[in-house]
Structures are given as C-alpha cells and as structure tokens.
Image: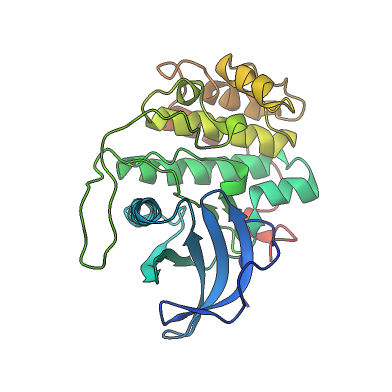
Amino acid sequence: MTTLSYAPRLAEAQPVGRTVGGRYRLRSQLGRGGMGTVWLADDELLGRPVAIKQVTFEVGRTARARALDEARAGASVNSPGTVRILDLVRDGEQPWIVMEALSGRTLAATVKRDGPLPVERVRQIGLRLLDALEAVHRAGIVHRDVKPANIQLGADGRVVLIDFGIAWSPTATAEELDDGFEGGGPAWESSAVFEGSPAFVSPEQLHGAPPEPESDLFSLGATLFAAVEGRSPFDRGDLFATVLAVTEATPTPFRNAGPLAPVITGLLEADPARRWTIEQARAALLAMAPLAVPPLATYPGLD
C-alpha cells in the first residue's frame, strides 16, 4: 500500500476519521510545520490515498490567501519532480490543499537514519532536482524553501520537490473567487518575519532581496552538501552563527563530496551573478563518471 512520509510522524492533533470537504477522510498525521499539518487521507469519491495539508499559517483571510497561493504555485508546475496538487477545499473556515500520495521518506529523514549518502546517489538526486527546479522556474515560480526536509525520495525512484508553502511568483494576482478563497498580490515586500530555514537559504534572501531563481540554486547546493556530508554546510548550532556563515558564504569543509565538490561549490557562490546555473551544474554532473552503485529505485528502506 502506498504510504506517505513528508516528515516524521507526529502525534495526532485531530480525530482520525474526520471527513474534510465532504470527501477526504483523515487516516493519520504525517508531519507538521510552521505553515500547517499534512495528513494521510482517503479520497472516498475516487477510492485512493491522498496527502492533505491543513493550512494553519494564520486564521482568517491570511490562511486562505496563503493556501490559494501555495496551491496555485504547485499546480502551475508540470514535472514528475514536483508534488502534484489535486484539489483545494474549504472545511468551515479552514483551507486544505489536497496532493498526490508519495511513497518513501524525505532526504532529511534518510540522511538522519543512514548517514551521508554515496556520491553517485547524490549525483542522481542532484540531476533530478535540477530538472524539477528548471520546471519550477520555467513556470515563473521561485520555491524559496529547497532543503532536505522538502525533498521526497520515492520507493519508485522519484525525487520530488514538495511544499510550495512560501513559494513566490511575480505573476500572482489578488482576486476574490466564488468559493471564497482570496489570492495574494504580486508585489514583493521584505518582512521582518523570516520565512525559510536559515541553514539552507541564500545570502541575498537573508539580506531581504526579492526572490530570484538563483536563490533556489544556492539552496540546492546546501541540500546536496547535506546529502553527501551528512550535515548542513552552514549550521553552526546557533542561529546568529548560522546566519553569519550563510551571509559570508563560508561552508564547512568537505569530507566526502569528492567529485561533487566543484558542483556544490559553484552552487554555493555568494554572488548570484557568479553562481552556477542549472545548465552548468547539469553539465558537470553528467560529465562525472557514474559509480557502481544501485539506481535510486533499488535502495533499501524507501518503501
């Protein structure tokens, strides 16, 4: 049976068996973050498992607007490397985003359980994520939260970028829909409330610059570093020290990266204008001689 593992399973926060939107029956909680809670649910109309996110960023209009923005951002991307958005429903005043059910576990959970991943496996993951980000950026979206906890490694070999909760698009429009959902606006406003994970964001994000695709590539570099080294390149165990390490682009020295080191270094370039592009990173990863390890779909422990 297909299972979901967007994040480590937490204690139930609502009764199992509740039906959302007259259709989606909650089965178990999969994870919880600052923007909401993700549940495994049964779509009783079509008879299939789904993941359903209870958006709890704030009550009232803000939660509805953020739910609509997240659902639209995810739905605008057509790629096997991003999670598919299936529906957006209201249950009372609460918005819920319905997504495809994914097997496996997150990259963060995999590294926590297994330790640093083999270079070849990380190379394969990197190539899949470059394809996903290319599709995201082609759709005019900046994900803004690329990190190991938002990368799902499927038992079928898929590598899926999930959670568009803080994604940004300059084409977003403010509007009222007939179903009562309210959209966000296109203007970028730097906020004193930081959104994202400090150890995986780009220096320009910390400086309050408008979101750009280059920022996602810096986060990808930090993610690949964490995958092959088993730790974040910038996490210093203290928020101030971590932010300082990011803003100065001073990653922890490599120990395991080997031939991946030049690619990761290029992606972690502090200056967005000098940072490696998707094309440069893809060419370098493809030029690496594949190592004799199993493909992604055959790794144990992903079911």
Q: Quadrant of the N terminus?
A: bottom right
Closer-to-camera residue (127/105): 105
State the colouring used for the structure image: rainbow
**In the foreground, 53 or 292:** 53
- 173 up-or-down from 144: above or below: below
Q: x, y percentage for residue 23? A: 43, 81
- Identified at 61% across, 39% down, the residue is 123
Q: Quadrant of the C terminus?
A: bottom right
Residue sitting nearer the eye, 103 or 13? 13
Q: Is residue 251 above or below residue 56?
A: above
- Is residue 255 shown to the viewer in this render? yes
Identify the residue at horizontal 40%, vertical 71% (top origin): 92
Q: Position of residue 44 (x, y in %)?
A: 47, 85
Counting every numbered tag in the picture gives: 0
**Quick check: 192 left or right of 222?**
left
Farthest-out residue, front: 60
Q: Which residue does the image show at 67% across and 46% down from the upper left?
A: 108
- Going by the image, does 269 lie left or right of 171? right
Indicate the quadrant where residue 182 lies.
bottom left
Q: Position of residue 251 (x, y in %)?
A: 66, 20
Residue 297, picture quadrant: bottom right
Residue 284 appears in the rendering: no
* Residue located 65% across and 48% down the image: 107
Q: Residue 245: where, in percent of width, then height?
A: 64, 18
